[in-house]
Amino acid sequence: MTGTMKYKQPERGCDAHVPGEDCSSLPTLVVPGFGAPVWHTKWIARELRKHGLGTVTLEFPFMGVGDMNDSAERLLGEVETACDRLHVDRVNLVGYSMGGTIARVYIQRFGGAKRLGRATFVGAPLDGIYTGFAVLHTPAGRQVRRGSDFMRDLNEENCWCESDKCLSIYLTHDIIILPSRSAHLSCGYNLELIWPVFHWGLVFSPQVISATAEFLRGGLPAGAFPGEHADGREPALT
C-alpha cells in the first residue's frame, strides 16, 4: 500500500478558564474517519488543544477508505513513534466516525490496550452499519457493513476495552450510523445526544469537544453512563 501517515509534534496549551489545568497530559492522537479531509482532523486537534491537550494529527492513505486492518497497523506505528519521540508509554485516542472503528481494531488486535491512556469514540460504527452497503466499492465499506465477516470476527473476540478508559459519544438518531445502537459501547461509558445534528456535525459541537477533553483528562462528562458489560468504575486521573 502506498502513502504514509504524517507525524506532527504535539502543541500544548492551557485553557485559562479551567482552574488547575494540567498541561502535562498524554498526547492525544486524532484518528480520522472515512473520507475525512485533512482540515477536519486539524480542526478537532486545534479545539482539543484549547482544552489543554497535546495532539498528534493523523492522515491515512486513500482518505481512510482502505482495509481497516492496514489502517490499524499504521496507527500502531504512529503510536509507537509518538511514544518514542515524546518519551511517554501511553497515548490517548480520539476516533471519529470510521476512525473510531480503526481505533477499536488497533486496541483489540494490535496490542493497543497496553499503550492506551483513554479513548473517546465520536459517532463511531463500532458494531457495523447498514450504510456500509452504500460504499461496498471500498475495503473499509465492505468491512463495516452490518453482519460482515469482519465485524462478526471482531465481536467474537474477547472484550476489548476497559470501562474506565473508553467513552463513546453518539446521536440517538444518525442517518449514517444505522442502527444508532452500533455506536453503543457495552464495555465502556456512553454519552447519548439527541439533537437534530448531522453525523459529521458531531465533532464540530463545542459540547462534544468539551466532553471528549473532560474524559481524556480523567473526568466523566455529565450524562455519561456505563454499558451493560462495564464494571461501573469511574475513570481515575493518572
Image (cartoon, rainbow, N blue to C red):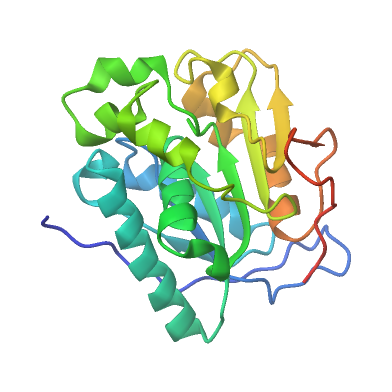
Please report the residue visible at 87 percent of the width from the left and 70 percent of the height from the top.
Answer: 20
Instruction: Look at the image and tell me whether residue 74 can be seen.
Output: yes
Q: Position of residue 121 (x, y in %)?
A: 57, 42
With 149 as the anchor, is 96 left or right in this view?
right
Above or below — where is 138 with respect to 177?
below
For the C terminus, give its image quadrant.
Answer: bottom right
Please report the residue visible at 39 percent of the width from the left and 39 percent of the height from the top.
Answer: 33
Please report the residue visible at 15 percent of the width from the left and 58 percent of the height from the top.
Answer: 3
For the N terminus, give its image quadrant.
Answer: bottom left
Above or below — where is 149 with respect to 17?
above
Q: Position of residue 117 (x, y in %)?
A: 63, 65
With 133 as the anchor, is 121 left or right in this view?
right
Which residue is more in the foreground, 6 or 93?
Answer: 93
Above or below — where is 191 with respect to 145?
below
Outermost residue toward the right in this view: 19
Which residue is more in the foreground, 57 or 12?
Answer: 57
Q: Report the number of discs.
A: 0
> Which image quadrant is residue 93 in?
bottom right
Outermost residue toward the left in this view: 2
Q: Position of residue 46 (x, y in %)?
A: 53, 55
Which residue is more in the foreground, 159 or 64?
Answer: 159
Which residue is more in the foreground, 225 or 36?
Answer: 225
> Which image quadrant is residue 19 in?
bottom right
Q: Position of residue 120 (x, y in %)?
A: 61, 47
Instruction: Look at the image and tell me whether residue 30 can be seen.
Output: no
Please report the residue visible at 83 percent of the width from the left and 32 percent of the height from the top.
Answer: 223
